[in-house]
Image (cartoon, rainbow, N blue to C red):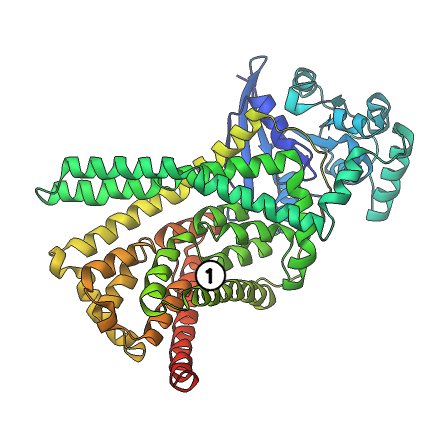
Amino acid sequence: MRKLRVAMVGNPNVGKTAILNALTGGNFQVGNFPGTTVERKEGKTTIDNVKVEFIDLPGIYSLKAYSADEEVSRKFLFEGDYDLILNVIDASNLERNLYLTLQLCSTKSPMVIALNMIDEAEKRGIWVNSKKLSEFLGVPVVETVAVRGEGIDKLRKAIFNPGKCRISAKSREEAIKLAEEITRSVLKKKSSLTCVDELDEVFTDPVVGMLIFLSAMWMLFKFTYQVASPFVKLIEVGVDFAAGLIGSKNVFYSLLSGGVIKGVGSVLVFVPNIAFLFIGLAFMELSGYMARAVFLMDRIMSRLKLNGRAAIPLIMGFGCNVPAVLTARGIEDSRVRFATILSIPFISCSARLPVYVLLAGLFFPKNGGEVLMVIYLLSVGFALLTAYLLRTFVFKGDADFVMELPPYRIPNLKDVFMNSWHGLKHFLEKAGTIILAMSVVLWFITNYPSRVDSYAFVIGDAIKPLFSPMGWGREVSIALLTGLIAKEVIVETLSVTAQNLHALLSPAQAFALMVFILLYMPCTATMAVIKSETGSWKWVAFSAVYSFLIAYVTALTALYLLRLWLIYGFG
């Protein structure tokens, strides 16, 4: 059977994924380009007895290789194995899109153009003469509305009859000039203030837009965690029931119930949250609102050498660091993406809150609210400081951030489902296996040789001297070790190993412990997704060591400062 490889190229937010969905029926895989963390989608379908493979390259504005995405795309287009280019263009932003098209012409590859979102262009008073555009460029131009499947059949036929550009630009200046000339010739625009323009003024307003953004984030939080909560509890009950049913009669049953089933449960318990998060993000992205939110936040984040897209995962981190790290994949600039990912573990997730509530309630009954406020301020401060330092000294360079505001539209439910499913599938395949393996290892060290004298206690005794400057005993050391499984496990461990926390800790030591728990090494699930999103254990090790050192120094400083305050401030 004949095979055909098609490279899909276009600016961000032009609907490439929607076209890929329409052409393949959603049959595509998400991975990375070899040796990079740049996302790559590959879809397969059969058209007229020909196997067609689509390689969806990352959304780019240029082939000049200013960013990692552009570098990967350029290398593939000039050196990769493909038969033709499918250039997807947003009809409402023709001139900007043609700048890339004219650069693609320099590859001398056969090409077909999908003039997408033609309906949105017409709503904005823009009409493009696709026939005239095809005559100018010398390649087939097919009008499409991918979300409704319009023009897809014509596009399938056009793929087998591509053309080669009859014009190209030798320089950036020539490409800009040609794009302007072609646009003037093929485009007619009715100049008037549209409903879209009025909505943009509201959503990007520094005051009103920020209030809308915070409301949208609050609703996303509620949707991600509260709506998912019954499903999470159902999974927890199911896992506990299955583990209890098997029991722990011998080593094998104990491994199966406590290691494997609990390990699978530690993966599944994240599925509802992550699924609802991706559904919410897909609605925001496909509706066109996400781009406005990112544009709004860019004014603030640029001061930290980040860009607007970094705000979303950092805010999501207050719910759970795992989906927050996964959300960071929406940041196109790899330097900003890595800095954001490595900063997220400092954001205090909801799993740490039970520990704060326990310690603040016991040791600061009159000032618990103020103590919690300090903890959360430290969380935000260290996350933003880390991001700034990483961008200044490790991931250097200006943040590449160019964005066009896509049209508003009602999201297609099929596209929402497909986008959410591929994100969830990525988590299960990449991070899920690591979380399962880590859970089994941690089960082993907390249960052998025996539960009352396990390797965890041996390790706890071994690392106890490390925490002697803080005055923390064996019980705290073991709790911090089990906290690597999940931070909320610290409460359970302390309840088992320490009968009276007042006998173990002073108020200053308790506050220092809260600070340490806030900042020290990420849980195993977060480390797993850091590995899957960065593609290297190096950054997992960096995150673990860096956060531990920050936590140690900050907790020790907090201990002595609070001691002085309690002695001299209230004495």
Q: Which residue lies furthest to the left in this view?
A: 249
Amino acid bearing label 1: Phe
Q: Is 369 situated above or below 242? A: below
> Which image quadrant for residue 182?
top right
Q: Where is residue 432 in the image (x, y as percent from the top left)?
A: 36, 42
> Which image quadrant for residue 476?
bottom left
Q: Which residue is drawn at 52% across and 28% down?
A: 417
Q: Which residue is nearer to you in this view: 88 or 383?
A: 383
Q: Which residue is drawn at 46% across and 67% down?
A: 370
Side (left or right) of 440 relative to 371: left
Q: Is 563 situated above or below 448? A: below
Q: Where is residue 278 in the image (x, y as percent from the top left)?
A: 51, 38
Side (left or right) of 348 relative to 388: left
Determine which residue is flagged by label 1. 346
Residue 161 visible? The answer is yes
Q: What element carries label 1?
A: helix
Residue 102 visible? The answer is no
Q: Which residue is nearer to you in this view: 117 or 357?
A: 357
Q: Is 28 situated above or below 325? A: above
